[in-house]
Amino acid sequence: MRDSEVAASSVSVLARALRARVRGGVRFDAQARGLHAMDASNYRHVPTGVVTPRDVEDLAAAVAVCHEQRAPMTVRGGGTSIAGQATGRGVVLDTARHLTRIESLDPDARIAVVEPGVVLDDLRAAAAPYGLTFGPDPSTHSRCTLGGMIGNDSCGAHSVAWGRTSANVAWLDVLTVDGVRMRVGPESAVEPEAGSDIGAERIRAELLALADDNLALVRTGFPPLARRVSGYALDRLLPEHGRDLAGALVGTEGTCAVVLRAGVRLVEAPRARALAVLGFADDVAAAEAAPAVLPYGPLTVESLSAELAALAWSARSVRLPDGGAWLFVETGGDTRDEAYARAVAVARGLGLPASAYRIEADAAGQRALWRIREEASGTVTRLAGDVEAWPGWEDTAVPPERLAAYLRELHKLMRRFGLRGLPYGHFGEGCVHIRFDFDLISEPGVARFRGFSSELADLVVAHGGSLSGEHGDGQARAEFLPRMYGDELVGLFGRFKSVWDPDDLLNPGVLVRPRPVDADLRFAGMPRTPVPVAFGYPHDGGDFAAAVRRCVGVGKCRESASTASGGVMCPSFRATGEEKDSTRGRARLLHEMLVGDVVTDGWRAEEVRDALDLCLSCKGCRSDCPVGVDMATYKAEFLHHHYAGRVRPRAHYTLGALPWWARAVASVPSAARLVNGLAARPALARAGLGLAGLDPSRGLPAFAPEPFTRGWVRRRPVSVRRSALAEPRPRVVLWPDTFTNHFAPEVAWAAVRVLEDAGLTVVVPPRPVCCGLTWVSTGQLDTARRVMRRTLRTLEPALTAGLPIVGLEPSCTAALRSDVPELLGREAAELPGLVRTFAETLAECAPGWTPPRLDRPVTGQLHCHQHAVLGDAADRALREQAALSGTLTGGCCGLAGNFGYEPGHAGISTRIAAERLLPALESAPYAEVLADGFSCRTQIRELTDRRPRHLAEVLAAGLAEGLDGRA
């Protein structure tokens, strides 16, 4: 047994003791342990249990119990640590769930008092009305916690102006494992809690004696680097640095004391900002230029390579100046003109030609550019060719004037080891972020990882650098600290920890007496060969394990409603705040399922099924996750295996087979009228929904009296259709999806009206077709494949002729473009390239057509599948042409096909709608409500008195009204 583990015989005693004295969550089950077994590093440590304290006193109670039981502890915030310091084999104390209070904010003193689980963006939002902000801002600012930032001494893009977290902490209220509670800060008389003064004074005296007894070593042993984060900051104990115990604790990675609350300094935010994007030949040239920017007093000097930008989804719609690498230099001022002038001065001062720089003063334009840089932490995990890249040496730092030379030698070292990686980062302070395509699975690959790590450590030290410039040492680099500091100074680190934590219960194996860099790798136990799966996973070589490995833990899916930066991901986490309901949490449990030592039932695992229950299959993570995790597909795959050979929930049969039920109703004269009449009676509707295994609180959408396809045959006899085909007009195939065909045929007729007005000939498939989406979303993949193959046979003439296939329902259109080819592979190879949205069809097939000028504001919902898979650029352009002003809200409507109808989901469904959709509708009471998705329209009708329409309906109505004063 490792020293950092809890003996099996003691686990039940520990669990009982914690449950008796802690009011928050105490979980020792496989799901909770699996959810917290990893952070964003290469390491995996399965904890004994997980505690989510309700408040600071509850956290103190948990620490007391763990100390009494001699149970190791790891205090965790957002779980985005890259060096392995937020995962441990003892008890994980998760502060991010409840310890989220900003206790006070004094704008005059510029001090905020925060609990450790406060998310950085929440603090910045609270400070913004006073013109203040918290200076350090890691790229994970929307989900990282202040406690985690204090543990790592986090920096971020603006540290060149405002310093590391350690420079922005006024005091800390901390607790030792043996119950000493004290407030520490520079030159402070320690303020212990009642009854703890002797322990506090002992700690203070021992720490100051440690520094005073080793003055020469402490004064000379720390390189004067702005980005020195490695090791313990013992130099903060020196008299010339104010005997700052708080400064010495910042960056100790949770190994010394537990932070209960912190007083943090706020800085004045510039009233205006501008961003200069400066182009250079490559990253070395950018590094050579970076020191020349510093005399201009910039707020940031960040680097980004062309290779990295090419991988970033957000960069596709952003114009960057000429170059193979760029420096992002932000300037501030009291006015926009002042900030802009400073940015121009930087570009011109470096002698760059006009084509090699861009100055952006518009706030929206700056956000678009910064998004590329901020998403780099996820983007760089997949190199060109979908090659996996991993951290471990993510943030080395050298003096800025040595950075270019360091990068040259780093590239040589990479070539010698046959490694790839894309450098970027905080070049103004000599800090380089880079992930390498380590093979961390095979024994030779792990050996090469260790050998490279050893040589890179020596290279960093040779350039006067720090092994860590931002993310801490953790298990990833601590083994090599003696090369940077020497054995004697590292020995003092151990003595410093022992003063605070003599029993080594806080984060053992991290920083002091560290575990080896190549031990405990997260991939140990993962399948070495691909497991049999239904989907093709084309971007992961058909390997489901590789698809699951996409999640590296950066946690963008953990953005809350208050910190969300846009997009869709992850609606269920925003509604519940539970890790299991995040994309990351679900990916973690799938990982554990594949490893099999914690989640032991494989595809039958209820822990995984329960975590996937609230996944809306919105596909938001497919586009919003920086590494392209596609949880909707993983969920369908899991359900397919989980229920193989077993009875499924009734909702799967009811909603999965919806196309069959709809066709059955349509096949019987007057059946639609009968079903609608029964559904209109509340008691009968509730009984029917309950019998079908659906949530009885939902309403039932009405079947159309006549499906579109039947009306098409009736209104367009064969002779008329043949005559239309004889005309020399471009032909398009209108896809009669189940929802439009059987529930909203008016949408299809409106689309026909518009498409024909645009000069196109509309063709409708001669037999029923279905994309198979309802079977995919319920994991009935064998049936889905049969349905898809039948559809492809029906579409064969259109596919052969290369006709555009026009989708009106975004979810079905997205399925044609993604799910069908990913399930059928080469059989459906031609299909995705022919699928078009309604707006794309008009833009590509009728570019000269002018829509009616409608001159009205719009609001409503952009379908999540359109956001994630299809894109809405053509829709926005079409609305602009039609003089429809305003934007559609992002996020998810909360109904999401079958999700909102499944038992127990109604409340979550409504909460998700209340986050963005309902406020958008309330803020625009007189606007036209647009929603192309049938689920979105259904949700809006159920929760409001508004009557949403498809864009095709609005345009068709404009044509009927003769609004030909076209835009």
Image: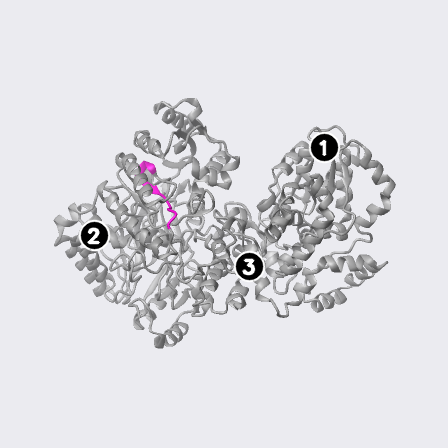
**For this view, does 227 lie left or right of residue 804?**
left
Amino acid found under the numbered disc labelled 2: Pro
Q: Secondary structure at mark 1?
A: loop
Q: Is residue 911 left or right of residue 2?
A: right
Is residue 428 within the magenta segment? yes
In terms of sequence position, does the residue under pointer 2 or pointer 1 come before the other?
A: 2
* Amino acid at circle 1: Pro
Q: Is residue 276 above or below residue 44?
A: above
Q: Which residue is mark 1?
A: 851
Identify the magenta region. 427-438
Q: Contact (CB < 8 A) between labels 3 and 1?
A: no
- Nearer to me, 761 or 131: 761
Q: Indicate how the structure is coloured in the image.
A: one colour
- In the rendered image, residue 525, in percent from the top left (x then y), is placed at 41, 63
Is residue 488 or residue 829 the one in the foreground? 829
Query: Real-space Cα distance between discs 2 and 1?
Result: 70 Å
For mark 1, does the 10 Å Cα neighbourhood hold few (<14), some (14 to 19), or many (20 or more) residues? many
Q: Secondary structure at mark 2?
A: helix
Instruction: Give the labeled residue for mark 2.
Output: 482
Tag 3–tag 2 contact (CB < 8 Å): no
Using the image, tell me which numbered label, if any, was put on residue 533: 3
Is 280 on the left or on the right of 503, as rendered? right
